[in-house]
Image (tube, rainbow, N blue to C red):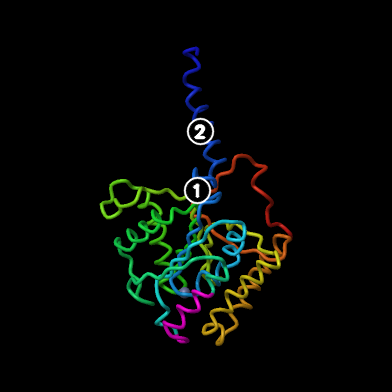
Amino acid sequence: MKPGLKSTSKPARRASARRVSLADRNQPSGGSALQPLLAFGAHPDDIEFACGAVIAQETRAGRAAHLVVCSRGEAGSYGNPRLRVAEAKKAAALLGATVEFLALDGDAHLEMRAAHAVKFAEIFRRVRPGIVLAPSVVENQHPDHSRLGRLARDAARIARYGGVKELRRHKPHAIERLFFYAVTPEAEPRDITPVLIDVSAPEIISAWTEAMEAHASQVSARNYIELQLTRARLLGARAGMGHAVALFPNEPLVFESLSQTGCAARNF
Ligand SMILES: [Zn+2]
């Protein structure tokens, strides 16, 4: 190779490596075709209501999904912890996901602690997800939600670090994408352009609805299901599809070319 070409060869090699890594992004060697999805919820029904449709869609496409619920809803006005756990297990099964419950500081008492982020990072290393979903960090919502979003974001970073002594049992793990979800319209970040996921397929809408209905103790007081379906319908109408769910990426998304970026929601 000519010496003069040396300076351009490095970026070329990097570009080539990047193409491979993008192509293989969802095909880890020796594993299933798609890296798992990991979702965090502060309360037993948060994940299902905010983004149950997205999870149903991913599991039906063959991706494993694991839900981590950080309380048993013991501070809620309706239901009781035993019932809430049973409802969450039923809902997770309807979405095709597994679920675990973490005892941290208790419902309505979640605190920002480095130890929690490390505990989450250990889950990242155990589950080794490609995609992580967590509540948005917008503060105008249940305080457990925004704190959990910050803890999950911290954990995504800590899971990559090789020298964290509590995490040495598992190999470091770098996730591919962290998306925030908004349980309510107030929790939608104003400073992040959402990615809209088309969840219009009738079987996805019905799996999502059934998963929300599984939280019978919560839907008896207010029509939360109608609220979420209407939000999805409005987003779908904006994007020229039946229903869509908004997710908010924590970092810029990377595409190999403009043609892979899909369409934009610009129906009006
Ligand atoms: Zn909640």
Residue holding disc 2:
17
- Residue at the image point whose x is 45% and y is 50% from the top: 175
Query: Which mark is drawn over residue 207?
Result: none
- Magenta region's main secondary structure? helix
Q: Nearer the viewer, residue 247 or 118?
A: 118
Left or right of residue 175, residue 221 in this image: right
Disc 1 under 8 Å from ligand 1? The reply is no
Q: Amino acid at mark 2?
A: Ala
For this orientation, the residue located farthest to the front is 30
Q: Position of residue 130 (x, y in %)?
A: 49, 52
Q: Nearer the viewer, mark 2 or mark 1?
A: 1
Residue holding disc 1:
31
Left or right of residue 86, residue 171 in this image: left
Q: Position of residue 36 (x, y in %)?
A: 50, 55
Q: Where are the magenta residues, as a range?
A: 77-90
Classify 63 as above or below 163. below
Element type at mark 1: loop
Left or right of residue 221, residue 119 in this image: left
Element type at mark 2: helix
Q: CA distance from mark 2 to mark 1?
A: 20 Å
For this orientation, the residue located farthest to the top is 2
State the count of labels.
2
Q: Amino acid at mark 1?
A: Gly
Q: Position of residue 217 (x, y in %)?
A: 52, 85
Tag 1: Cα neighbours inside 10 Å, few (<14), some, or many (≥20)?
A: few
